[in-house]
Image: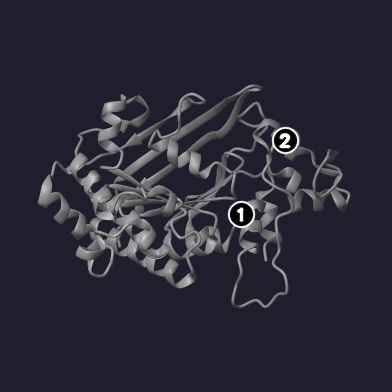
Amino acid sequence: MIGTEARQVLLEVRGLQLHFETQGGFLSVVDDVSLKIHQGRTVALVGESGCGKSVTALSILRLIPQPPARIVDGRILFNDAEKADSIDLLKLNDRDMRRIRGNRIAMIFQEPMTSLNPVYSIGEQIVEAVELHQGLRGKKAWAAAVEALRRVGIPDAVRRSRDYPHQLSGGMRQRVMIAMALSCQPALLIADEPTTALDVTVQQQILELLRAIQSETGMGILLITHDFGVVAEAADDVYVMYAGRIVEHGPVADVLSHPLHPYTQGLLRCTPRLSQRKDRLKVIPGTVPDPRRFPAGCRFHPRCPLSAERARVGDRRTISVKSELSNSVLRRCVEEYAEEPSGIPVLYEMGSNHFVACWEAERTTKHWT
């Protein structure tokens, strides 16, 4: 198996910062996000709804309307095999970006029924992409669309190409979305919650399909999900996102077996396991903070069980603050300054390519069960 170091980096996001303009000012919804996607590997971006996962993905393709959004900093470097050097997608004009979007970088959106046009057959919708990016016309374009449907396992593809979205099941519609995305043979596929609302059997089929096509073509995949079960099944590397920031990332096996951030641990405890029989699943108390009122320091500290526990046992480093778990938390989680003046913990390496942004990361391993 080819190691990560030997693979080409297809996409590298560096220090991406995106704000939304509101009547009350600018809201930071993506804050200093960096990630890498290598050829032939699947990278999962995980977090609760509202953490900024989909906004990050849409920013890569520049599908966020500007205004009200504004990318204030960062680079998105795409190493296209068709070009000698990497390209910064944020510096491309609209015309050049359209040549890449849907062609070299494709995306499967979250809900197929709302992404597919109900008044056009599925064949016509795939043909549109083929004509735009592949330069095929007429029968050749239609034959390419049928072949794309056949490739994703849709039976009787010729007949099905004439069907409309409402005539297909949820799993079939998702296959159509994959066929449309792959019809132009992209180097990178962004899949935003591709298995949401599908039953377990169909979910497994979709993941196996993506894995088979990736093995055949060598494309990279950015998988947006909130489900660590999907991450364990499909991903090679994982980035955990909370309140617009990456709080932990590393190889999937390392993060699943030795999660370092309390938020990652909380997400894993929420995942059902066949080996454990429990009446109720554990949950992470509270909700993702409003971008208008991010807490000082570590943005997870109001919900962090470790910080609250240290306060309960009388740790002298505590400070009284309003918290969802306790009246006090560790002072350093709120106030400590590091490389950033905000006091927000920065990512640092605690294992081989395993990074975490938590002041108490060394203690978290003792509390993980």
Q: Is residue 340 above or below residue 132?
A: above
The residue sitting at 61% across, 65% down in the picture is: 271
> Of 53 and 73, which appears nearest the observer?
53
The residue sitting at 54% across, 61% down in the picture is: 228
Viewer can see residue 270: yes
What residue type is disc 1 on?
Thr
Quadrant (top left, top right, bottom left, bottom right) of the N terminus: bottom left
Residue 95 point in image, percent of width and height: 27, 27
What residue type is disc 2 on?
Pro
The residue sitting at 20% across, 35% down in the picture is: 83
Q: Residue extending furthest right?
A: 314
> Of 339 and 156, which appears nearest the observer?
156
Q: Secondary structure at mark 2?
A: loop
Sooner in the amino-acid sequence: mark 2 or mark 1: 1
Q: Is residue 190 above or below residue 19?
A: below
Viewer can see residue 43: no
- Asked whether, in this view, residue 4 is left or right of residue 332, the answer is left
Q: Which mark is residue 295?
A: 2
Residue 178 point in image, percent of width and height: 33, 56
- Asked whether, in this view, residue 127 is left or right of residue 176, the answer is left
Residue 12 point in image, percent of width and height: 38, 39
Identify the image's colour scheme: rainbow, by chain, secondary structure or one colour: one colour
Reading the image, the residue beneath label 1 is 264
Q: Is residue 13 above or below residue 231?
A: above
> Of 72 and 121, which appears nearest the observer?
121
Marks 2 and 1, how far apart in space? 19 Å
